[in-house]
């Protein structure tokens, strides 16, 4: 439900940045957004999530991670792709995470890099929790930012401290070979970086199953 939750995170940050105290009335803008969020909330009941991702020991397993950022938030999501003996393929959302952008202004490419760093953390988590090793399972990490992909292809000491620290961390966690470019329209992480209303997420194939 990350694309829905991030809407609430953005609203909370807007309230904090406006320095609204606990006992104060919300601004008209924030109050309208909160009422809209509440009005949409019941639509979450229409969302059903399968407990089984389709895994079978005989299937060929791939893990695909996507990351993206907007001016308000950044996020990452991971999919499991399974190819069966009969050639059929099933792809299923495994997990996702979002964070709001810092109140201090950060450029969009740097926020995209923060999204890539978050994805690297999620990949680490999947490897550890599911006991998946990189020898038997292929990992692919996708970004629609050509700047981020360029940063990852050069030694970290080439860049400024902000970029260098994150590039070093990402490369240590994932390496560089698995990073690839995805178009923005095919990037499901775009949904978690911008937010989606519940009624628009229910049948959203890109979010639940990844790009075709």
Image (spheres, grey):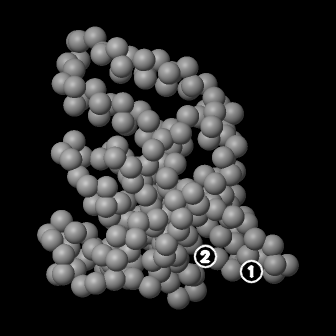
Residue 110 appears in which quarter of the rendering?
bottom left
Is 63 situated above or below 135? above
Q: In which quarter of the image is the C terminus?
A: bottom right
Image position of 160 (left or right of 139): left
Which residue is most to the right? Answer: 86
Image position of 87 (left or right of 193): right
- Residue 78 in view of the camera: no
Is 45 situated above or below 150? above
Looking at the image, which residue is at 54% across and 43% down?
A: 1
Is 150 or 204 nearer to us in this picture?
150
Which residue is most to the left? Answer: 161
Q: Callout 2: few (<14), some (14-19), or many (20+) C-alpha neighbours within 10 Å? A: some
**Please, what secondary structure does the residue beneath circle 1 have?**
loop
Residue 14 appears in which quarter of the rendering?
top left
**Please, what secondary structure does the residue beneath circle 2 have?**
strand
- Residue 1 in view of the camera: yes
- The answer to whether mark 2 and mark 1 are in CB contact below 8 A is no
Residue underneath mark 1: 58
Image coords of residue 3 (percent x, y) = 50, 43
Is 167 situated above or below 155? above
**Cα separation between marks 2 and 1:** 13 Å
Disc nearest the viewer among 2 and 1: 2
Image coords of residue 63 (percent x, y) = 56, 72
Image coords of residue 186 (percent x, y) = 59, 60
**Circle on res. 189:** none
Looking at the image, which residue is at 41% across and 66% down?
A: 145
Looking at the image, which residue is at 69% across and 80% down?
A: 60
Image coords of residue 32 (percent x, y) = 42, 17
Residue underneath mark 2: 62
């Amino acid at each position: 439900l990350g694309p829905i939750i991030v809407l609430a995170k953005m609203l909370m940050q807007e309230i904090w940045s406006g320095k609204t105290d606990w006992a104060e009335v919300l601004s008209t803008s924030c109050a309208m957004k909160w009422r809209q969020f509440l009005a949409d909330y019941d639509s979450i009941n229409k969302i059903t999530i399968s407990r089984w991702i389709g895994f079978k020991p005989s299937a060929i397993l791939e893990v695909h991670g996507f990351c993206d950022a907007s001016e308000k938030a950044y996020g990452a999501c991971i999919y499991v792709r399974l190819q069966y003996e009969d050639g059929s393929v099933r792809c299923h959302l495994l997990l996702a995470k979002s964070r709001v952008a810092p109140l201090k202004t950060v450029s969009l490419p740097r926020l995209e890099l923060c999204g890539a760093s978050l994805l690297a953390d999620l990949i680490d988590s999947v490897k550890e929790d599911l006991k998946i090793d990189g020898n038997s399972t292929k990992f692919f990490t996708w970004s629609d930012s050509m700047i981020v992909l360029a940063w990852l292809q050069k030694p970290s000491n080439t860049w400024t401290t902000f970029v260098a620290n994150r590039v070093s961390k990402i490369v240590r966690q994932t390496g560089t070979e698995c990073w690839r470019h995805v178009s923005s329209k095919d990037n499901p992480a775009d949904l978690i970086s911008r937010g989606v209303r519940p009624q628009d997420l229910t049948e959203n194939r890109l979010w639940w199953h990844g790009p075709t």
